[in-house]
Amino acid sequence: MTTPTFASLSAPAGGAAGSGAAERRPMLTLALSKGRIFEETLPLLAAAGIVVTEDPEKTRKLILATNQPDVRVVLVRATDVPTYVQHGGADLGVAGKDVLIEHAAENEGAGGLYQPLDLQIAKCRMSVAVRADFDYEAAVKQGSRIRVATKYVAVARQHFADKGVHVDLIKLYGSMELAPLTGLADAIVDLVSTGSTLKANKLVEVERIMEISSRLVVNQAALKLKRERIRTLIAAFAGAMNTTS
Ligand code: PRT
Ligand code: MG
């Protein structure tokens, strides 16, 4: 028996409404954030036969239709993707490992979120960076208390605890690079991709904490109720990754 493709399981585009059970299948909702995650998820969706028919950069709509009548995309902030999926506002979503770790720490493990696939997209690393004139190694060796500004409090806390370094963590929501330049902090924990943001702000990367990529997250209840469709989608994504990497 051959496995049907996701496209063949869906109601035919433009088919007469209400004729047959296929059209009455419940909506499959995918949560994505605008920008790199949206852009890098598009080819994976295409492999599953799904084409988003509106451009998020050109519309103010937050719900985007696709060529499949029973598949839609909701646009949410990157940090809100796990929340939407966990509570069933979306069946699936794509979120960075950075976002997922912080979400789990803030939500006691975030039950209800299944992570079946590392999509290997939106890759970067989480690192410690300091001003070029700050001797990080010496501060660590001397056992000084280091002030660290970051959006990623859970990852930073764990990293410095593992090293046995005492830190005062300062939670920020963005523009972490500014903290060492203004004297707010000695160091930052932030995402680094090309390194050009650090360079432009005269900061240097002194430690790599972990590699980051984005993962597919699925609502546990949706996985049970829409099992076949979600499994077919996961298989198409996995297949596309093998052919593009
Ligand atoms: O931007 P916004 O405030 O709307 O939200 P967001 O920053 O959470 O979303 P977005 O779309 O920027 O990032 C979504 C996900 O992409 C993150 O959760 C990461 O998993 C992943 N990702 C991959 C990155 C980067 N690369 C990245 N370079 N997220 C952010 N950056 C930022 C970084 O914080 C720093 O300010 O880009 C800057 C560094 O880039 P380089 O290339 O100069 O090193
Ligand atoms: Mg950003």
Image (cartoon, helix red, strand yellow):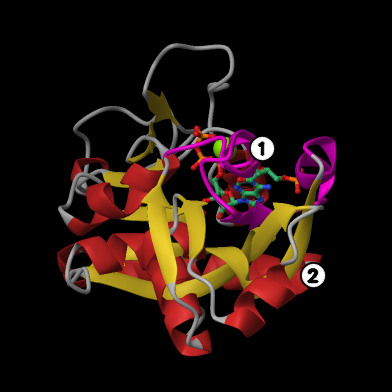
What residue sits 61% from the left and 81% below the top? 142
Element under disc 1 = helix
Residue 237 in the image: above or below residue 91:
below
Specify the quadrant of the image occupied by residue 213: bottom right
Q: Is residue 179 visible?
A: yes
Q: Viewed as shown, does residue 230 lie left or right of 235?
A: left
Residue type at tag 1 = Leu
Range of magenta residues: 173-201
- Camera-side residue of 51 and 117: 117
Q: Give residue 245's mark.
A: 2
- Camera-side residue of 33 and 177: 177
Specify the quadrant of the image occupied by residue 17: top left
Residue type at tag 2 = Ser
Residue 15 in the image: above or below residue 242:
above
Q: Viewed as shown, does residue 39 lie left or right of 231?
A: right
Q: Give residue 181's mark.
A: 1
Residue 19 in the image: above or below residue 219:
above
What residue sits 57% from the left and 50% below the top? 45
Local packing at callout 2 (Cα closer than 10 Å; few below 14, some 14-19, many 20+) is few
| Quadrant into which the C terminus falls | bottom right
Q: Are marks 2 and 1 in contact (CB under 8 Å)?
A: no
